[in-house]
Amino acid sequence: MRNRKNNLRNKLGRGFLKLCPVCGKTKLFDSYVKLKPRCNKCKTNFAKFKTDDGPAYCTIFVVGHIIIPMIVFLESLDNPPPIEFQLTFWPAFTTILSIWLLPKMKGVFLAFQINVRDTSS
């Protein structure tokens, strides 16, 4: 059981780093979130796994749980930042964080699907 947990943890970590979840030797994406058809080293076929909208939903969930507490904290201060700053900073920060996190989430979703061998669409 310990080996299986460690194996899942390794696969999820490789997926988060945007590397092949099985071997960890090659890049997972051809472009921003377009998966390569297969791994060049271990020949794992990525095309049969469908990540669909799951990574986007999880990215929104995680980013929201990071951003909202920060906004609430700043607003609870005695002297919060001016509204003009907040109207420009928070949308920009949210966008940048989402763009950074989405391919990592897609890698994690693919790694989980590979681990449980889920090829259903």
Image (tube, rainbow, N blue to C red):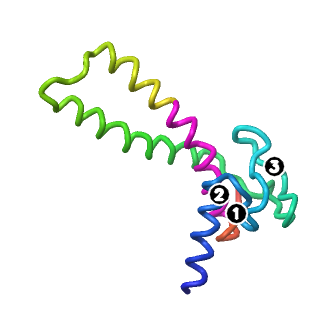
Residue 15: image tag: 2
Residue 107 is one of the magenta-drawn residues: yes
Count of residue discs = 3
Query: Is 58 on the left or on the right of 16, as rendered?
Result: left
User: Is 72 placed left or right of 11 in the picture?
Assistant: left
Residue, disc 3: 36
Report which residue position mark 1 lands on.
21
Q: Circles 1 and 2: CB distance less than 8 Å?
A: yes
Describe the element under mark 1 as helix, strand or loop: loop
The mark that comes first in sequence, 2 or 3, is: 2
Q: Position of residue 94 (x, y in %)?
A: 45, 31
Q: Is residue 75 above or below residue 17?
A: above
Q: Nearer the viewer, residue 27 or 108?
A: 27
**Contact, CB < 8 Å: mark 2 with mark 3?**
no
Residue 64 in the figure: left or right of residue 103: left
Distance between mark 2 and mark 3 Cα atoms: 13 Å
The residue lying furthest to the left in this view is 78
Separation of marks 1 and 2 at Cα, in angstroms: 5 Å
Task: Give the residues drawn in magenta, as a range.
Answer: 96-113
Asked if the residue at tag 1 contacts the one at tag 3, i.e. Cβ–Cβ closer than 8 Å, the answer is no
Q: Which residue is at a point 60% across and 55% down the rendered structure image?
A: 16
Inspect the magenta stretch and tell me whether residue 104 lies in it.
yes
Q: Relative to residue 35, is residue 74 drawn left or right?
A: left
SS of the residue at dot 2?
A: helix
Residue type (three-letter) at the residue carrying disc 1: Pro
Residue visible at 32% across and 37% down in the picture: 68
- What's the residue type where badge 3 is placed? Lys
Marks 3 and 1, the one that precedes in the sequence: 1
Q: Residue drawn 39% across and 22% down?
A: 89
Is residue 15 positioned above or below 65 on the image? below
* Residues packed near mark 3 inside 10 Å, few (<14), some (14 to 19) or many (20 plus): some
